[in-house]
Image: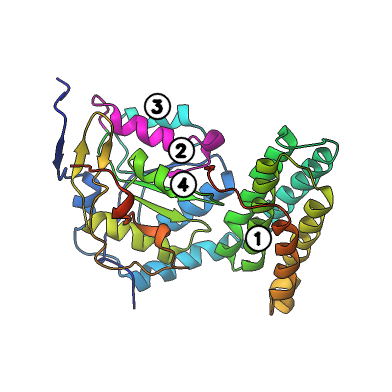
Amino acid sequence: MSGTAGEINLKNISVLVADSCEPAFRITRSILKSFGADPVVNAQDVAQASKIIQRGMVDLLIVNFDIDGKQGAKLVKAIRSDRRNPARHIPILMTLGHTSIGTVTKCRDAGSNMVLTLPLSPGGLYDRLSWIAMHPRPFVDQDDFAGPCRRFRNTGAPGGMERRSSEFEFNDDDEMDAAE
Amino acid sequence: MPDNKTNTARIVPTRFSQMAKQKPAMSRNDAILAGQSAVTELEPEYLEWTDGLLRELWAAVDASAGHEAFPNPNGEKAYDLANQIRNLGATFEYDAVTHVADSFCELMHRLTEARRNDPHAMQTHLKALRLVSTPDFKRDGSGDLTPLMDALRQLVDHYPEPTGSAA
């Protein structure tokens, strides 16, 4: 069974990959370009990423949680909470390497649309982008949280590589604060 | 004018979602084939990347051995390097590299939380990483990893799993 939410067209989608690991960026760019995305650019640190995002030309942000000494969640939060940021509502996929307790919750609470546990696979990346495109969530704008609604039902499971509940969507309603 | 209104929730159309729904779409199977082909082209570079990262990691572990306890800058660097190695391996079907590097990261995480240093456990992980990162191992020896992973797990489990800290 495929884990896709539907077939997507990524032709000419512009992507910013915020990742300080050059090989990881090269892999992500190669896969995205094979999907049709273009341009796919890199930011090595949070400051560079913020600068590129402010230009308003990015359709999708893929950010590594560990960028700049684990500043990925902080970057996402800054984008979501800045009401003047033209890219405030762009889809954001957070990538995670080795994780510890609370990491996925941090990504969710920062305002990420989805998380993806590394290593990357073409199928895993395609599935998550498909879910982001086909299942848009209401954007919540509160004083203490801005981002895709954290309270929603997971209506199916993207497949991909290993299946871990924390890997693809935030569906842990029980521990969530009211977001609406 | 910035919108200062709070407690709102609405679907905001994005250029991404609009463009992604346009026809013709790329099927999942075609995307996987194209993506896998792109990854395969990078495999020679992957071997160079991993070799370079392993050299840096070995140097960081050697330097960290001189410290009595964690956290220390060389230990943090070793964690970052091992995490990078972890994040690349399975993309190129070096699954054992990802498993061993993940164990190394967990060891470093626990040592940091316990404020301990254990050069022997770190160096044993490094030797394992060297073994599994070769093309020969991928081709011939990646059968049953259980004994190797069990041995590494024992080294990691010597230190308690952190309960409350986040990455």
Quadrant the C terminus of chain A occupies: top left
Q: Is residue A122 left or right of residue B92?
A: left
Q: Nearer the viewer, residue B163 or A60?
A: B163
Give the answer, above or below, for where A152 lies relative to B115. Answer: below
The picture quadrant where one finds residue A110 is: top left
- The mark lying in front, picked from 1 and 3, is 3
Q: Amino acid at mark 1?
A: Pro
Q: Residue A72, labelled with which disc?
A: 2
Asked if labels 4 and 1 share a chain, the reply is no
The stretch of residues the image draws in magenta is A62-86
**Same chain letter for marks 4 and 2:** yes
Q: Which callout, 4 or 2, points to the residue nearer the camera?
A: 4
> Callout 3: helix, strand or loop?
helix
Which of A64/B102 is in front? B102
Distance from Cα at disc 4 to Cα at disc 2: 14 Å
Are the numbered discs 2 and 3 placed on the same chain, yes or no? Answer: yes
| Residue bearing the label numbered 3 | A51
Q: Could you say where residue B98 lies in the image, as x and y percent from the top left?
A: 62, 61
Q: Residue at x 78, y 43 (%)?
A: B117
> Residue B100 location in percent, x, y?
68, 61
Q: Is residue A79 in the magenta section?
A: yes
Toward which corner of the image does residue B66 lie, by quadrant?
Answer: top right
Give the amino acid at mark 3.
Lys
Chain bearing tag 3 is: A
The residue pinned by badge 1 equals B44
Compared with B6, A29 (above or below) is: below
Discs 3, 4: same chain: yes
* C-alpha gap between disc 2 and disc 3: 15 Å
**Cα–Cα span, label 3 and label 4:** 28 Å
**Which amino acid type is shown beneath numbered disc 2?**
Gly
Q: Position of residue A63 (x, y in %)?
A: 44, 43
Identify the subunit bearing mark 2.
Answer: A
